[in-house]
Image (spheres, helix red, strand yellow):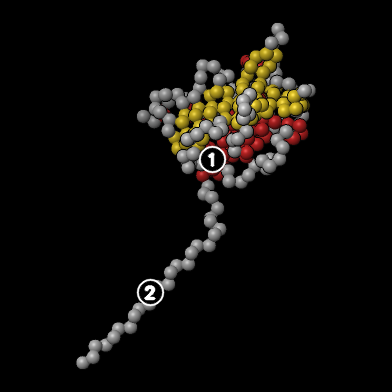
């Protein structure tokens, strides 16, 4: 039976359908916009040639890169603060990236899209700390490797495990203060520094970008306690849908032809003259 007969979110706008939402909201700060539509990540990977190994009847997504070297797992948990998204090499765990359930999918996509990109990220070969510094994030006193977002609800850190050979990783902790002085955690993320440099740079770029994220009309995040700012976007749902389709179509385009010249074809065999029989 086709899923198109069901009244379900699976029949949403990213599957070449017209969005039934009347308008979209621009939500800021973007790290409090909520998780968003997971297919923003998964559909692009599938369009890029990733293989789907998900088990029917179980609520998870298992994707493998075309070269079988990388795995992505999306497994929703009762606790949205736990790692819903996990990306790592298939045969070893030399690095991993984990994202909580409320991590905006646009930020995860900047990480996963770069895994397939042959071109280096423009920020790959530079100090990533200049990104938050240039966008209003402030370094914390006494912590040279941590920066706080302008609204003071997101903390970006570079930390290491205490061991003989420290393993550095980049972490994000998003929380909002409560009236009693405590904090309510919204989402966490952790990326090993040994992860592909372009992917790490893509995530940090998306995290610190000051622009808002688009969400369905009237979306409110109860966990943010008034820290969420949203207003009507000039982008229509149909325009948003077309942008999604263009992104998927771009992922399906074949790469540039091999610039190396092909080997010349061997010359045809020369016909040997026939010897006449002597009578």
Q: How crowded is mark 2: few (under 14 residues within 10 Å), some or many (20 or more)?
A: few
* Residue 109 point in image, percent of width and height: 58, 34
Residue 249 at x, y percent in the picture: 53, 43
Disc 2: which residue: 269
Residue 174: x and y, percent? 66, 21
Residues under labels 1 and 2: Cα distance?
A: 49 Å
Residue with the most extreme left position: 279
* Residue 240 appears in view: no
Kindly give the residue lying farthest to the right in the view shown: 141
Query: Position of 137 compared to 76: left or right?
Result: right
Tag on residue 227?
Answer: none
Which residue corresponds to mark 1? Answer: 248
What residue is at 46 percent from the left and 39 percent from the top?
68
Residue drawn at (65%, 36%), measured in percent from left and top? 201
Q: Quadrant of residue 149?
A: top right
Q: In this view, does 15 lie to the left or right of 132?
A: left
């Amino acid at each position: 039976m086709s899923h198109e007969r069901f009244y379900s979110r699976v029949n949403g706008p990213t599957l070449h359908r017209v969005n039934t939402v009347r308008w979209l909201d621009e939500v800021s700060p973007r790290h409090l916009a909520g998780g968003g539509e997971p297919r923003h990540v998964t559909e692009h990977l599938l369009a890029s040639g990733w293989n789907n190994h998900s088990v029917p009847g179980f609520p998870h997504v298992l994707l493998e890169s075309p070269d079988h070297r990388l795995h992505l797992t999306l497994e929703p948990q009762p606790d949205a603060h736990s790692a819903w998204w996990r990306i790592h090499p298939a045969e070893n765990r030399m690095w991993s990236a984990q994202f909580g359930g409320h991590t905006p999918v646009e930020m995860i996509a900047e990480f996963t899209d770069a895994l397939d990109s042959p071109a280096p990220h423009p920020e790959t070969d530079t100090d990533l700390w200049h990104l938050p510094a240039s966008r209003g994030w402030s370094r914390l006193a006494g912590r040279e490797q941590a920066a706080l977002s302008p609204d003071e609800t997101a903390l970006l850190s570079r930390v290491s495990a205490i061991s003989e050979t420290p393993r550095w990783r980049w972490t994000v902790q998003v929380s909002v203060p409560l009236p009693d002085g405590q904090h309510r955690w919204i989402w966490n993320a952790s990326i090993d520094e040994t992860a592909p440099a372009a992917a790490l740079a893509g995530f940090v770029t998306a995290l610190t970008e000051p622009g808002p994220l688009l969400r369905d009309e009237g979306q409110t995040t109860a966990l943010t306690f008034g820290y969420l700012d949203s207003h009507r976007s000039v982008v229509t749902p149909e325009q948003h849908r077309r942008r999604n389709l263009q992104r998927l179509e771009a992922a399906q385009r074949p790469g540039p032809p091999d610039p190396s010249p092909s080997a010349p074809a061997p010359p045809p065999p020369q016909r040997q003259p026939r010897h006449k029989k002597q009578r």
